[in-house]
């Protein structure tokens, strides 16, 4: 999703090579997005193991290193805070090539989260750091990483503003909440059991998106019956996900990306976490941190007359700004 606006805005003088690291191996989490956003087929598609995350990380890093040894690049652009991001950044640094980090400077200050550790390490490696919000830029400055750091806005807002106009209203027959759970801390046995139990106390039915990591965690925890209140649905394409959110009465998610999109769509949202790297969204009455989901039957009733403040995340032209800076940089 972050790649799409950059590819769409790419100057003709730039040759882009795309690596699919294989971290999202389900077609719904990878191939569907390439088709939906009309993106070119990746130049390399890696096939790391699916189960052992440590081994998966090692193989991704090694396979990216092989690509970097036999091809010549001015820089390598990495996105966000996933294991793919860190694996590619380490491989790039090992080959003395410049790392460009998109979505730099985000901090939740929860060091138990792998994503927090990943983003901090990648920021320390990056030659160019592109912050999606002004607070993210301030975080970088506080950590003495302000040099070659820029507030450019959020590429996901570029995508949202481009695609939202193409969405069609879908009639909704009944009330429901949209829910996604995939953070590692929420997938541990006891915690996942607690979340499923709480979801079943909702007065409104729950459409639970079955992320591959969630599927695996449910099987591992022997949670085979989700309960009558939970309707499992397969991972969604971008359009389907936005339409699902649009038709919902509210959102429950531990995803950073979905948390922003629900804010932009002005949907009441519960975040089952202690902290978030997107603190700007929780300044709205609609987005609330609620680790125990205590407000599951009241959060959709919150009144909020303030429209979302898109300017916090830029002006929808982040991709153009990123390219201007990359082209002006002597790597």
Image (cartoon, helix red, strand yellow):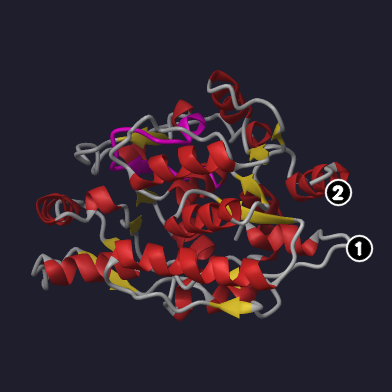
Magenta-span inclusion, residue 299: no
Picture coordinates of residue 158 (x, y %)? 70, 51
Answer whether labels 2 and 1 touch (C-beta < 8 Å): yes
Give the labeled residue for mark 1: 13
Residue 278 inside the magenta-drawn segment: yes
* Residue 84: % across, % down: 48, 60
Q: Residue at x 74, y 62 (%)?
A: 73
Rounded to the nearest angstrom, the CA distance separating label 2 from label 1 is: 10 Å
| Quarter residue 127 falls in | top right
The N terminus sits in image quarter: bottom right
Residue 88 visible? The answer is yes
Q: Quick check: 109 left or right of 237?
A: left
Residue 229 % position (x, y) = 19, 63
Residue at horizontal 37%, vertical 29%? 109
- The span shown in magenta is 265-281
Residue, disc 2 = 327
Callout 1: SS? loop
């Amino acid at each position: 999703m972050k790649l799409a606006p950059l590819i769409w805005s790419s100057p003709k003088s730039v040759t882009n090579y795309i690596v699919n690291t294989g971290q999202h191996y389900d077609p719904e989490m990878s191939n569907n997005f390439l088709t939906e956003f009309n993106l070119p087929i990746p130049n390399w598609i890696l096939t790391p193991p699916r189960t052992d995350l440590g081994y998966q990380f090692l193989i991704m890093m090694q396979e990216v290193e092989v690509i970097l040894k036999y091809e010549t690049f001015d820089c390598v652009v990495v996105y966000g805070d996933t294991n793919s991001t860190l694996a590619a950044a380490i491989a790039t640094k090992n080959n003395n090539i410049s790392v460009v980090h998109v979505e730099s400077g985000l901090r939740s200050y929860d060091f138990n989260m792998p994503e927090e550790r990943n983003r901090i390490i990648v920021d320390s490696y990056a030659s160019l750091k592109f912050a999606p919000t002004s607070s993210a830029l301030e975080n970088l400055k506080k950590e003495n990483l302000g040099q070659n750091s820029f507030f450019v806005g959020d590429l996901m807002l570029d995508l949202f503003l481009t695609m939202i106009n193409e969405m069609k209203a879908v009639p909704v027959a009944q009330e429901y909440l949209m829910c996604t759970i995939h953070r590692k801390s929420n997938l541990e046995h006891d915690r996942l059991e607690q979340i499923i139990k709480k979801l079943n106390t909702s007065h409104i039915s729950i459409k639970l998106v079955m992320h591959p990591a969630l599927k695996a965690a449910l099987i591992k925890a022997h949670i085979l019956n989700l309960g009558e209140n939970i309707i499992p649905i397969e991972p969604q394409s971008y359009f389907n996900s936005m339409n699902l959110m649009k038709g919902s009465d509210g959102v429950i998610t531990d995803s950073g990306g979905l948390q922003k999109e629900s804010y932009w769509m002005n949907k009441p949202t519960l975040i089952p976490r202690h902290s978030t790297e997107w603190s700007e969204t929780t300044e709205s009455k609609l987005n609330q941190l609620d680790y125990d989901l205590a407000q599951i039957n009241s959060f959709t009733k919150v009144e909020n007359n303030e429209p979302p403040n898109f300017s916090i995340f830029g002006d929808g032209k982040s991709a153009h700004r990123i390219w201007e800076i990359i082209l002006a940089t002597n790597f």
